[in-house]
Image (spheres, grey):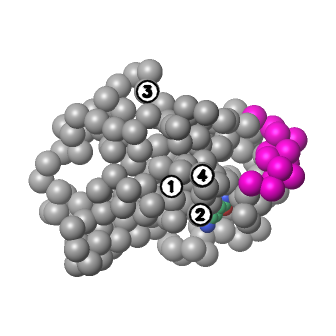
């Protein structure tokens, strides 16, 4: 045991990437246990460490933490990145939840049905440029890439994952048993239909 958080996920961005970013921003070193196959994922489930039989899971401070947002809040609070009072936390939550809506759409996009790819892309771009980017451009004057810890994370050789390519999309589909393409319907939690 090194005392570093251990991240359990497949070898891709997915829901774990925001956790990687946050740990990097906090300057916290972490280790990763990356599974490559359905069998390895099932072994993890059978080990009993996944509360809902889902990842991301992060071993931290004696806990096997699941649920992305719970993990993000814990890390942010632990490393003093979650505001100084309730109002600041509320603002942080509003930015984070908006970004989650956008990143959910981006995350599911590669799983679009071929005939829906173009329309989904148009939808995401339209939402991103008219609804989300203006908020972040207005509120955040400092480029996040200039924050030293983030800047290091953006350099080659960091634990940042590359965008999914066709091969890793196939791997994710096999591991998580996605059977058909995803249908991007709405933002927020209901984004997929089979
Ligand atoms: N609300 C959960 C959703 C987790 C989730 O859907 N994880 C996927 C992988 S990204 C998974 O483990 N799927 C397997 C399953 O649900 O059986 C979170 O935000 O962590």
Tags 2 and 1 touching, CB below 8 Å: no
Please identify, in this view, whether the residue under mark 4 or under mark 3 is nearer the observer.
4
Please identify, in this view, whether the residue under mark 3 or under mark 1 is nearer the observer.
3
In space, the residues marked 2 and 1 are separated at their CA atoms by 19 Å
Circle 1 residues within 10 Å: few <14, some 14–19, many ≥20: some
Respond yes or no on whether mark 3 lies under 8 Å from ligand 1: no
Q: Which residue is mark 3?
A: 158
Q: Image check: 155 left or right of 139?
A: right
Q: Position of residue 69 (x, y in %)?
A: 50, 64
Q: Which residue is mark 4?
A: 62
Respond yes or no on whether mark 2 lies under 8 Å from ligand 1: yes
* Disc on the earlier residue, 2 or 4: 4
Q: Quadrant of the N terminus?
A: top right
Q: Residue at x 17, y 57 (%)?
A: 140
Q: Is residue 25 above or below residue 80?
A: above
Give the quadrant of residue 27.
top left
Circle 3 residues within 10 Å: few <14, some 14–19, many ≥20: few
Q: Quadrant of the C terminus?
A: bottom right
In space, the residues marked 1 and 4 are separated at their CA atoms by 32 Å
Q: Which residue is mark 1?
A: 106
Residue 191 visible in image: yes
Q: Position of residue 98 (x, y in %)?
A: 38, 69
Q: Which mark is residue 67?
A: 2
In space, the residues marked 3 and 1 are separated at their CA atoms by 22 Å
- What stretch of residues is rendered in magenta? 36-49
* Disc on the earlier residue, 3 or 1: 1
Q: Residue at x 44, y 21 (%)?
A: 157
The residue nearer to you, when weighing 147 against 161, is 147
């Amino acid at each position: 045991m090194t005392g570093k958080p251990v991240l359990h996920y497949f070898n891709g961005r997915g829901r774990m990437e925001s956790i990687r970013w946050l740990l990097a921003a906090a300057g916290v070193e972490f280790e990763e246990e990356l599974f490559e196959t359905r069998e390895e994922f099932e072994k993890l489930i059978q080990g009993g460490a996944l509360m809902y039989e889902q990842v991301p899971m992060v071993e931290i401070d004696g806990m096997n933490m699941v649920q992305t947002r719970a993990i993000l809040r814990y890390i942010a609070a632990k490393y003093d990145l979650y505001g100084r009072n309730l109002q600041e936390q509320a603002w942080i939550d509003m930015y984070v939840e908006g970004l989650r809506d956008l990143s959910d759409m981006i995350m599911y996009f590669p799983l679009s049905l071929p005939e829906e790819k173009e329309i989904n892309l148009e939808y995401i771009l339209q939402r991103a440029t008219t609804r989300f980017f203006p908020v972040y451009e207005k509120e955040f004057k400092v480029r996040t890439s200039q924050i030293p810890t983030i800047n290091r994370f953006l350099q080659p050789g960091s634990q940042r994952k590359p965008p999914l390519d066709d091969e890793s999309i196939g791997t994710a589909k096999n591991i998580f048993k996605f059977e058909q393409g995803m249908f991007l319907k709405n933002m927020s939690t209901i984004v997929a239909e089979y």
